[in-house]
Every structure is written in C-alpha cells, then in structure tokens.
Image (cartoon, helix red, strand yellow):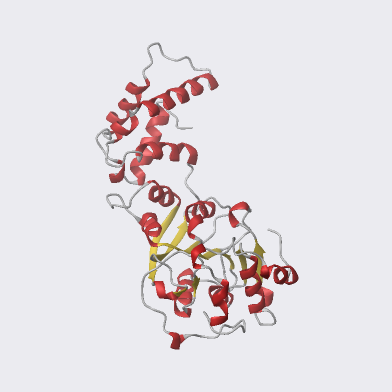
Amino acid sequence: MPKITTQQLRKRTQESAAGAIIKPKTIGSPYDKAKQQKSAGGSGAEGSRHFGPMFNKDLGQHILINPLVSQSIVDKARLKQTDTVLEVGPGTGNLTIKILEQAKRVIACEADARLAAELTKRVQGGPYQHKLEILHGDVMKRDLPFFDVCISNTPYQISSPLTFKLLFHRPTFRCAVLMFQREFALRLVARPGDSLYNRLSVNCQLYAKVSLVMSVGKNNFKPPPNVESSVVKIEPLDPPPPIDFEEWDGMLRIAFSRRNKTLAASFKSTATMQMLESNYKTFCASNEVMMEEGFDIKQRVLGVLDKLGFAETRASKMDIDDFLKLLAAFHDADIHFC
C-alpha cells in the first residue's frame, strides 16, 4: 500500500466526506464523560468536541469515544511488544492510541483523507509517531501487508468481504478483534439450530475459531448510531483446511437456498439440476470420461443424499463435519459445484 505524507494528508482535509469511515452500530452502557482520558498522542480527550463537525451521521460515521471500551478491545487481542497490528478504519485514532501503547508497530488503513490527517496530527511529535504508518485508501482494493493481529472498528458495508479477505490472507495471522453490527456478529458465531445460523456462519467457522467478546452501547460512539454493535474475536486455523472454497461455497449456496426445506428439496430444483448436469458434462469432457448411457443427474444427487442419510435433513441443523462429509461424497460421485 502506498504511504501518504503528512503534507498530502493536510492538503486533503477539505475534501468531501463521501469516503468517510462507516461505523458499526451498538448496545450497552453509556459513556461516562468523567472518565475521558487524554491520549498518549497529545491531541486531547477522546471524543472531544472539535472532532464533532467532521462526522456526518447520514453517512454512518460513528467514532468510538469511550476509552474503556477501546482498552477492552485491545486487551482481548493479547498483544505482544513484538506485534505488528493492522487497523482498518482508525478514524481519529481513539483506538489506535491504545494499540500503539502495546504493539511494536501499527499499520492503519484509512479511506477518508480528513480522518487520516486528524490521526497524523494526533501522533505528530509524540512518542508513537515512529510506530504508526498510515495507508490511505480502500482496504478491499489492496493487498494486505504482513501483520500479526488485526483490530478494527469495521465499516459495516465491508463486514463480510473484510472478514473473508482476512481469513484468506497468508501467512496466517494470530487473531483479529473486530467490531461489527450486532446481527452480523451473531451470525458469525451462530451454531447449528440457531435462528441466525447460515452460510456465513459455516464458512467463517470452517476457517477459524470465532467467539463473541462483548457488546458495545450506542452512547459509546459519536454521534450515537441507531443499531447495536458487538465485538468478535477470530482465530484462524493454522494450517487452514485443504478445501476448494469455490466448491465448498457452491454446495452451501444450494444447501441454504431454502432455509426451511430439506436438502433433497433444495438440491432437486430445476435450476440446480441443470447447473450440476452442466458441471458433470464439463468434468467428463475435461477428464476424458465417457458419460454413462441414460445418465440421470437427479438420481445421482439424491442417491448421495440418501446414502448419507441427509435427504430429509435441513442445512440449518448440519455442522461443519456434516458438510465436509457431504462434499466428499459428491466429489466421489463426480458431482461438482463450480
């Protein structure tokens, strides 16, 4: 990621707010103004009034202002003095300062030049200036640098793509502590049988241990958002499972396409059968395999489900091991999903 100089950042402070940080929303205890602390970067109390005009609530800009919440998030990451931390969406740096106190280095990726300039001023001339690198731009359009830990007050529009960008990042990092809109966070940690358990839950838990860390109240942000937020901790499996993700996700899309239907009902839809038959023909042609006379894709698919005892099972009740068995059985039957 290209670095941005202090001069360039200051020059952009008058630019439009269109690219500003979008803050996930939250629930919990109000912010006690008496507990405001001055940051080690020397820019004044967290959430001080001079930050206010920078934020446009209509654009979803909400900055974490409670130092106790910031400290709790950093504590959950269990940082080491040798760690390089990637922070996505640092805003004005309330969380950044807490990270800088414990980590060797912080790489902060900020989409809004105005907020990046504010963060630059905040650490300028202080003890942490040399430890902070600010990268200006859209994190989803860049290759990630090396990091040990990711901490983020995540812009809610990129919650899902950022999660999987992190999970697919190599080398594997130690953990990520991320603030999300509460419903999204609950989907990440949902278990089979839970009302929020879905394809997102399965995909994330295939690659990582995911745990709910804390809920954060609306009044811990400025301006207060309209929905609740939660913090989750993601610890990637190392090594990651040897799964072709496109195949895996293709199967899950079908399995969860009709949440209250059985697998048999989901897989035997006309569109699904046409897609699987096309994939089978492609597989046969690519591997110089002769198609059986009278081949019936529907019969083969339902045969796999019956053999495993999953025909009358609903995806919302299946765990990762069940889906792994199902994918292996489909592949044994030369049935593919991409």
Q: Residue at image x 36%, y 39%?
A: 257
Q: Which quadrant of the figure has residue 262?
A: top left
Give the residue furthest to the top: 293
Give the residue drawn at x 33%, y 50%.
197
Q: Is residue 247 above or below residue 44?
A: above
Instruction: Give how far across and how far down residue 247 sits, in percent.
Output: 46, 36
- Which one is nearer the viewer's eye here, 297 or 184? 184
Residue 94 in view: yes
Q: Position of residue 71 (x, y in %)?
A: 48, 77
Q: Is residue 193 left or right of residue 44?
A: left
Q: Residue 336 location, x and y as percent?
A: 45, 30
Q: Is residue 206 left or right of residue 82?
A: left
Residue at 38% across / 66% down in the picture? 228
> From this viewpoint, which residue is outermost toward the left?
312
Whether residue 292 sits left or right of residue 145 in the image: it is left
Task: Name the image quarter holding residue 16.
Answer: bottom right
Q: Residue at x 40, y 11 (%)?
A: 293
